[in-house]
Image (tube, coloured by chain):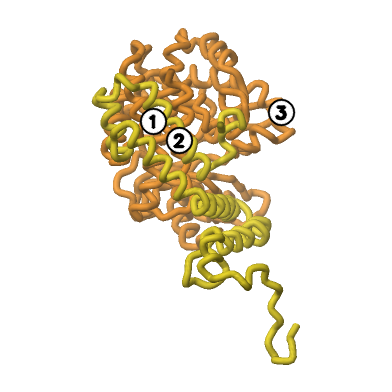
Chain colours: A orange, B yellow
Amino acid sequence: MGDPDLAERLRGVLEPVLGPDVVVEDLARLPGGASRETWSFSARSAAGGGGDPGTDTTGRYVLRRDPPGAPVSGLRLEAGVVEAAARAGVPVPRVVLAGDDRAGLDAAFMVLDFVEGETIPRRILRDPQLAGARGVLAAQCGRVLAAVHRIPTSEAPGLAGGDALEQLGTLHDRLGAPHPAFELGFRWLAETRPPRSGEVVVHGDFRNGNLIVGPEGIRAVLDWELAHLGDPLEDLGWLCVKAWRFGAGPPVGGFGTMDQLVGAYEEAGGGPVDRAALHWWLTLGTLRWGIICIVQALTHTSGALRSVELAAVGRRVCEVEWDLLELVP
Amino acid sequence: MSSGTGLPTPPPSGDSDRAPEEQASGELGRWPPHDLPSATELLDAVRGFLETDVIPGTEGRLRFHARVAANVLAMVGRELALGPALARAHAERLRGLGVGDDAELAAAIRSGALDDRLAEVRDAVRATVADKLAVANPGYLGPAQRD
């Protein structure tokens, strides 16, 4: 799917970074990213300027931008977090350019290096070429999360914090879509809340689907738009939410065991993990995914963003209700 | 193929001697006075089109959305078939707990008004969620969990 107008405007914002002769090619929208557009493209620039093909450089990049006209954006913040994550040793794509120059691209945007590899969860879980990766992914997730949680909060200024359960309850009440199963979940969470295990930078959406994977394992962690300050166990619990197994059996992302994840996390300096507290965060994550499903359906039905994908997600709420009833004793 | 009248020969119909009302009540998603195909058959036709023509002929985002669309049509077909019976069962469970709808049940769970009947509440909620899954994604529950 091409967009000549977008390619031309992209060329305009890239010129200062990649040179005056930069040419944008192969612009294609990538699947997923319902709330934020993701495009891949190539940029070719004649570094020598004289048209000598020997000096041409071609790079592959990814553009993330808000839907045109979106009111407020955290994309600028997101770019800062990705850079801080890189410094902490988290594998991430390099940020080439970030801006909220509406004149340039109609919306806040970020250009990243393209990282080769697989992101589609079902392929990560089934592709024979990635069998080796599946054996090591859970432990790698543990080590990578330990690095995420080492990002100094001072290097990621502007991130929101707050109480995850309270925020989820407020959001849920605002939706006006009461679900008895969710109420049972909220009650159990309120009655069994574990002590806070720390306040760190959490990725906020660390799961199968936001990882670029090669045969050797994780190459990059994507989608930092939900990064915030919170309990480190929030990321570990979210990774284990059943939806991110995509039909496979193993509890961590469909590829590994809790012991692999937790063992590697602790070994890499991520701090001791209380299993009961992890179960609490898994339950909260499950409830959170259920509420996100409702939000996505409302995004469609309200007309804010019409999409068959968003509409269909509304009917996944009952999957999450079922999972929640399995988790809450 | 045409007969002597210049009109195409209709394929044999199995229920041509039944009264229209009988056909209507006996067929899924078919209500008078609408013509054939029935709502269910129309859904199947569109789903077949998506699965046979669109999905194999597209890639990337469009292919993914076509697959989602085909799944949605299958879901609507299940809702046409099961909807009325599941709605009755749901209403029956709510009545048993003394509430009128899901919003009231949710409020009662939150306030603690049904705390003395929590096991019953949990069973009712679980049964309703299983019914929702029967429409939305029947494959989600293993055979052991499906009753």
Which amino acid does the dot numbered 2 rest on? Answer: Val
Nearest to viewer (mark 1 / mark 3): 1
Does A21 sit above or below residue A63? below
Which amino acid does the dot numbered 3 rest on? Answer: Ala
In percent of width and height, residue A12 lies at 44, 55
- Give the quadrant of the N terminus of chain B: bottom right
In percent of width and height, residue A136 lies at 65, 21
Q: Residue at x 49, y 20 (%)?
A: A145
Q: What is the quadrant of residue B3 in the picture?
A: bottom right
Does B119 sit above or below residue A205? above
Circle 1 SS class: helix
Report the chain holding disc 1.
A
Nearest to viewer (mark 3 / mark 2): 2
Circle 3 SS class: helix
Q: Determine crowd level at label 1: few under 14, some 14-19, many 20+ residues with C-alpha closer than 10 A.
A: many
Residue bearing the label numbered 3: A131
Does B13 sit above or below residue B70? below
Residue A258 visible = yes
The Cα atoms of the two marked residues, 3 and 2, are separated by 35 Å
Residue bearing the label numbered 1: A181
Q: Determine crowd level at label 3: few under 14, some 14-19, many 20+ residues with C-alpha closer than 10 A.
A: some
Contact? badges 1 and 3 (CB < 8 Å): no
Residue bearing the label numbered 2: B129
The Cα atoms of the two marked residues, 1 and 3, are separated by 37 Å
Q: Determine crowd level at label 2: few under 14, some 14-19, many 20+ residues with C-alpha closer than 10 A.
A: many
- Give the quadrant of the C terminus of chain B: top right
Report the chain holding disc 3.
A
